[in-house]
Image (spheres, rainbow, N blue to C red):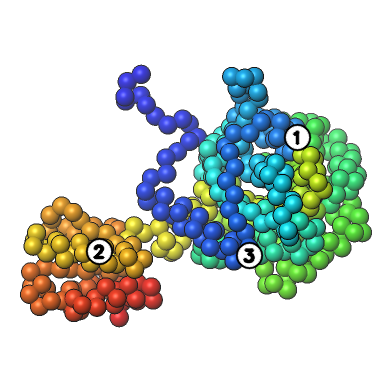
Amino acid sequence: MSTTDIKSIRGFVDILPERSRVWSFLEETAARVFELYGFSQIRTPVLEFTDLYSRGVGETTDIVEKEMYSFTDKDGSEITLRPEGTAGVVRAFIENSLHNSPGAQKLWYSGEMFRHERPQKGRMRGFHQIGAEFFGSDAASEDCEIIAMLWHFFTEAGISDGLEIEINSMGTPDDRDTFKNALSQFLSPLQENLCDNCARRARKNPLRVFDCKNPDCAALIENAPVMSEFLSAENARHFEDVKERLTALSVPFVVNEKIVRGLDYYTRTVFEVKAAKGLGAQNAVAAGGRYDLLVEKFGGSPTPATGFAIGVERAALLLEGSKNESGKEAEVFVGWIGEVCFNSAFALCATLRGRGVKTRIEHSASGIKGQMKKADKSGARIMVIIGPDEMKKSVVKIRDMKTGDEKELPEKGAAEYISNSVKSGGNS
């Protein structure tokens, strides 16, 4: 293979510096917001035994049937690249006896997942998620806290406009079995008119027909039974509590009874956060729900839990389409004229960076007009100019890159003024 033939694998992309800054902002926002709610970060392996997902996610789900990257290891073990984050966190929760720690366990993670899907906008074969898992309580308030935290993240990231939280209840296994039987009877005479995927799903796992994006199938199942008709009185009350508490927290939501989620471990509350525009057909930017039986299913002590995952690629697309300036390369660009001025400019950069200001400087000599173009491209709000005239007067010139206004400041105290201006969002 020649060097010209070396390319990335289809469905796997490089995150270049400009986009990487957006991703870093999302991860930093998640860390900051989640910490406010008492969540601690956990890091789990990319590789797990295949059985973890076939048992946990469900053997008849699309993920396990068609999408997992699995292989036989050299020792004969069946290994899988993780297709989602929850199962691995639950495995770590049990294996490391985290259930013995006092109080509820609140964990969050960030990492790459892998599914062999058809690549399209917002959906790659190698994709990234930021997720959170809350172990220890079956109270409706726990569901509300984790949904409120998710909404807080989107608000803090500046991308909540145009997003909508949709919620539903999947009940418990007895409710769901009754619902599945009723849905199977409804779908039976329709199978010849359903798409191939839905016809297969109707036979093996009828709840999955609600995931279909085919408008013809959507029309056929418009009047299908819904889960709310089969909830026990206890589970119906739980869902009412969720709605009441979310309303009390001023978290916006709508009920969508067609949400069933694509993983078999969910019980009771499930939810999705969808974008009205900007993501095409793959408009779910986050999703999650309660999974009260999964810990016990994996061999742990009975432990109720709830959680969610955010699609980083999709959140990044929303952020890039917004007016949020988080992905900018620099906040301040320091320009210099002539080699004699470089050391002063370089020292100012170091001082500003020490104050937490993203600062850029050109290391090779170039004209001030060229540096201004680079400052504009970097996204910097302020450009500092240090030339021979400024050095003679012991001042620096600062330029507002939006308005073009310029002013001189005494060299002493300039770093403090500039950093305060950046943090306050202004330049005066």
Q: Amino acid at mark 2?
A: Cys
Identify which residue, 316 or 218, lies in the foreground: 316
Any part of residue 210 in sight: no
Q: Is residue 98 positioned above or below 246 on the image?
A: above
Pointer 1 residue = 55
Residue of label 3: 37
The crowding category of the residue bearing disc 1, from other C-alpha atoms within 10 Å (few below 14, some 14 to 19, many at least 20), is some
Q: Give the crowd class for mark 3: few <14, some 14-19, many >=20 residues within 10 Å.
A: few
- Residue at which label 2 appears: 349
Where in the figure is residue 251, as x and y percent of width and height? 67, 68
Give the image location of residue 346, x and y in percent: 20, 61
* Distance between mark 3 and mark 1 Cα atoms: 31 Å
Residue 131, given in percent of the width and then of the height, sits at: 61, 51
For mark 2, does the 10 Å Cα neighbourhood hold few (<14), some (14 to 19), or many (20 or more) residues?
many
Q: The residue under label 1 is which amino acid type?
A: Arg
Name the secondary structure under disc 1. Answer: helix
